[in-house]
Image: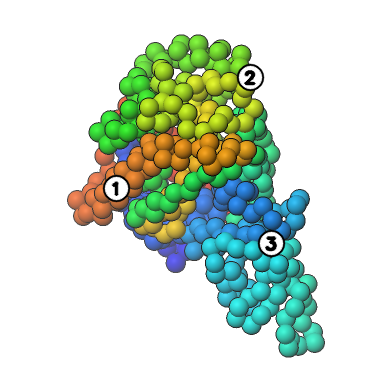
Amino acid sequence: MTDTSSRLVQSLVENARIGYSLEQDFYVSDAVFKEDMARIISRKWIVAGHVSRIPNKGDYFLFKIGSEQIIVIRENDQSVRAFFNVCRHRGSTICSAESGNAPRLVCPYHAWTFGLDGQLLAARLMPEDFNKAENSLIACHVRVFHGLVFINMSQDAPDDFDATFGDMGPILAYQGIDTARIAYAGSYPTTANWKLVVENFFECYHCVPSHPEFCSMHAPETLVAVGAGPSSGPADAIANFAPKVKAWEDKAAALGRPIGSLDDAPESSHLRLLMQRMNKEGWSSETQDGTAPAPLMGNRTAPDGGRMHLSFSPFSQIVADDHFAILFQFTPRSALATDVEMIWLVNGKATEAEVDIDKMTWGYHATTTQDKVITENNQAGIMSTRYQPGRYSDQEGSVMKFQKWYLQHMAAPKAA
């Protein structure tokens, strides 16, 4: 099966046309999805959640990706661990609840018991030559960075974390992501291939016909130029918009915001992005009326009217303004299923009375609900025998860059 799927992917990559959507098999094939998992998804640092979900020793949550389940658990005040949810006895899952607290990890099948460090503590009635030390839980690479829990399922050494993401630290610190708390979480499971979810997120060509709420929060010229990132619009629109961004950057820098941007090339490991710009004139926050739904976040002493879009990878994104941040998680589950999760973060010291949940979630809840419908319709059409790749517009530059990144990863030799 592996050789067959590899040959299929090789043929598809060789026949792909840059500037056009991908061939049908890329979006529907189980064989291609297995290669996606092996070549890309399992080898990337992906945000599993916010560390505030596990404040106490033994607190855990499950992160499900593809056919894998990862137990993310707090070992102690200094350590967060991650393990594959697979007992070393006969393979049963150990944790069945989506989250909880466990002083020990006990397999419900035969009661094998593991410590929070993954070490096997007890296994009843085993032969004398059984070695408990050789039967620890299988660890998953994990790193907590500014309050975000990243996992990496690589069997070999993963990409160096600090070299990959270290330069994002100042803006995450300024936003106060590490000291934030979760105000609301929304789930939008989407019956579509993960690449369609990402492609939709990476373009704003569809915003005007599809997202009235989103468009009401942003100036029309902004949507055209950088609606889905610095590479997403026509070159002339981006150039015309640049002086306005520079003027806002000067004002924001004077208030303490770290100014900078990232726009990784398709040859990069994670296709990172950092874009900062001003909100719609007169809008202090991305809400229905532009007013703040919560106290200022992070190190701000005054609002600067700015908006940040940060992408750790196509799977993990943050959109944030002065008063709240949204963590977007696009988690592949199968060829035709993607978990889309949004976590709204606010100042960790903000009381419930100070946060207007309805106001804060109004725009992006509506937009993501619409995106679910749009993307599922896209998937349904691609399933047709009459589907064929279509030409991209001048406002889909970020989609073309993602396509190049994806194809390069799929063309590269698989790890041994």
**Residue 256, disc:** 2
Residue at (30% x, 35% y) in the render: 211
Compared to 339, does 298 lie above or below?
A: above
Q: Which residue is mark 1?
A: 373
Is residue 3 rendered to the left or right of residue 220?
right
State how far apart marks 3 and 1 are (Cα). Answer: 38 Å
The answer to whether mark 3 and mark 1 are in CB contact below 8 A is no
Is label 3 or label 1 in front?
Answer: 3
How many numbered markers are drawn? 3
Query: Which label is found at residue 286?
Result: none
Percent across and percent down for residue 202 are 40, 36
* Residue located at (53% from left, 20% from top): 304
Disc 1 residue type? Val
Residue 223 in view of the camera: yes
Location of residue 250 with respect to 185 vertically, above or below: above
Check the picture and name the quadrant holding the N terminus: bottom left
Label located before the other in sequence (3 or 1): 3
